[in-house]
Image: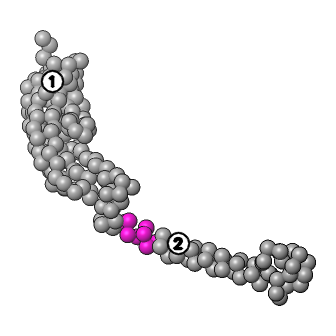
């Protein structure tokens, strides 16, 4: 085995041309490169995460196929649930069915919602009112429907239904004995 200059003869690695100094330099250089990589990663990850939280970042992620568009949803509620009738006093009554359609916060486009009010009693369901309303992006609209009911059973159910996305709310009201009609 021939010794490399600066290395005693018979030192392992002498034949391969590596000295302890060369090994140390290789380890240090590799270590510095690794350290630089970790530092760069530690700096870039929070910056990229912060950018991804912005509108522009979301757009870039969606364009790259790394993020889906925000999920849309709608909230449906009665404007004044306490004002809904607990009991109808006559066979034929008009009932105010006022409700709010609230579009998802952060939504980017206005949407048109098709709605209907259904009356169910004694095993049958009939449409009572229907329409369409445009709701601004992230906004809400109140729908003021008045429906005509005819009591034929002990109680009836009024349901407000959205076609898409399929959502519904309902309430039950009793028919007073004098209001019921037995066919």
- Residue at the farthest top position: 183
Res 86 seen here: no
Question: Residue 73 at what x, y percent from top left?
Answer: 28, 47
Q: Is residue 3 left or right of residue 154?
A: right
| Secondary structure of residue under mark 2 | helix
Q: Nearer the viewer, mark 2 or mark 1?
A: 2
**Residue closer to the observer: 161 or 40:** 40
Task: Kindly identify the residue that appears in the image at 26 percent across and 58 percent down.
Answer: 106
Q: Which residues are magenta?
A: 46-53
- Residue at the farthest right position: 10
Question: Residue 117 at what x, y percent from top left?
Answer: 15, 33
Within the image, what quadrant is residue 160 found in? top left
Residue 7 vs 85, above or below: the answer is: below
* Residue 8 in magenta stretch: no
Within the image, what quadrant is residue 16 found in? bottom right
- State how the image is colored: one colour
- The residue under label 1 is 126
| Secondary structure of residue under mark 1 | strand
Quarter holding the N terminus?
bottom right
* C-alpha distance separating marks 2 and 1: 63 Å
Question: Residue 50 at what x, y percent from top left?
Answer: 40, 70
- The residue under label 2 is 41
Residue 148 vs 61, above or below: the answer is: above
Residue 131 vs 108, above or below: the answer is: above
Res 165 seen here: yes
Quarter holding the C terminus?
top left
Q: Is residue 170 left or right of residue 144?
A: right
């Amino acid at each position: 085995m021939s010794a490399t200059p600066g290395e005693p003869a018979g030192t392992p690695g002498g034949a391969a041309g590596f000295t302890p100094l060369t090994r140390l330099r290789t380890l240090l250089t590799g270590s510095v490169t690794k350290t630089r990589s970790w530092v760069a990663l530690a700096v870039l990850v929070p910056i990229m995460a912060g950018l991804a939280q912005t509108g522009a970042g979301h757009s870039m992620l969606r364009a790259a196929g790394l993020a889906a568009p925000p999920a849309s949803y709608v909230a449906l509620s009665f404007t004044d649930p306490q004002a809904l009738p607990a009991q109808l006093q006559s066979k034929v009554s008009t009932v105010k069915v006022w409700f709010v359609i609230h579009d998802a916060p952060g939504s980017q486009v206005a949407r048109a919602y098709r709605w209907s009010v259904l009356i169910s009693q004694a095993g049958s369901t009939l449409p009572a009112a229907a329409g369409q309303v445009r709701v601004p992006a992230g906004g809400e609209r109140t729908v003021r429907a008045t429906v005509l009911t005819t009591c034929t059973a002990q109680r009836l159910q009024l349901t407000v239904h959205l076609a898409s996305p399929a959502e519904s709310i309902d309430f039950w009201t009793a028919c007073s004995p004098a209001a019921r009609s037995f066919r």
